[in-house]
Image (cartoon, helix red, strand yellow):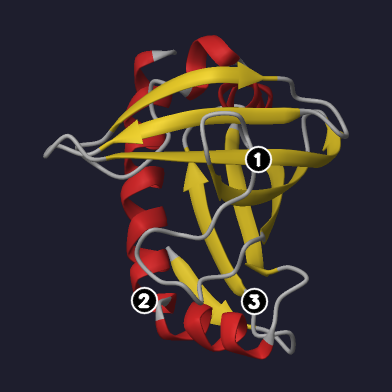
Amino acid sequence: MDENRNENNELVLTRVFDAPRELVFKVWTDLEHFGKWWGPKGFSLQVNKMDVRPGGMFLGSQKSPEGHVMWGKFVYQEVNAPEKLVFVQSFSDEEGNTVRAPFDPNWPLEIINILTLTEENGKTLLTLRGGPHNATEEERVAFEGMRPMVQQGFNGTFDQLANYLESQQ
């Protein structure tokens, strides 16, 4: 996985998956698939709501191996199958109200994620760009300080995605 920074200091991650673009998009947007691979290694995901359309919401909870539960949501901004998905990600309560991250009071309330998929020779290049959205300077600094951990988390999540895609072909 490559990681670099652009002029907006957002995180840019890329990964090639040995799967067609339509399948990669489907496992990001289909309730039956998403909960089986999303999240850090060792965590389980319970999906409570998944309405993938502009203005729609994903709401779910992740449970750590130690039993700690964290709620999160995506609010979809753009859905353009099978090439682009834009969503704002936040920690939330069980009702989907945005809350502060349990690990850092300065963590951004909103992170925008722009997922693009391009296909070449049956493989899919996934590019994920993201960073603080509507953030204060303190929130931007907190995100920057956690950049290596965010990248590591996505590496693990993308490993799980690669394994899941293999099982679907």
Upstream in sequence: badge 3 or badge 2: 3
Figure check: 76 above or below 110: above
Residue of label 2: 148
Q: Residue at x 64, y 76 (%)?
A: 10
Asked if residue 165 is positioned above or below residue 84 in the image, the reply reads: above
Q: Secondary structure at mark 2?
A: helix
Q: Which mark is residue 74?
A: 1
Q: Quadrant of the N terminus?
A: bottom left
Instruction: Give the labeled residue for mark 3.
Output: 10
Q: Quadrant of residue 161?
A: top left
- In x, y percent, where is residue 149? 34, 70
Mark sitting earlier along the chain (3/1) = 3
The image quarter containing residue 167 is: top left
Q: Nearer the viewer, residue 131 or 23?
A: 131
For the residue marked with disc 1, what is the amino acid?
A: Phe
Disc 2 marks a residue whose amino acid type is Pro
Query: The residue under label 3 is which amino acid type?
Result: Glu
Q: How far separated are the C-alphas under marks 3 and 1? A: 18 Å
Q: Secondary structure at mark 1?
A: strand
Instruction: Pick whichever, 87 or 7, lies toward us.
Output: 87
Q: How many marks?
A: 3
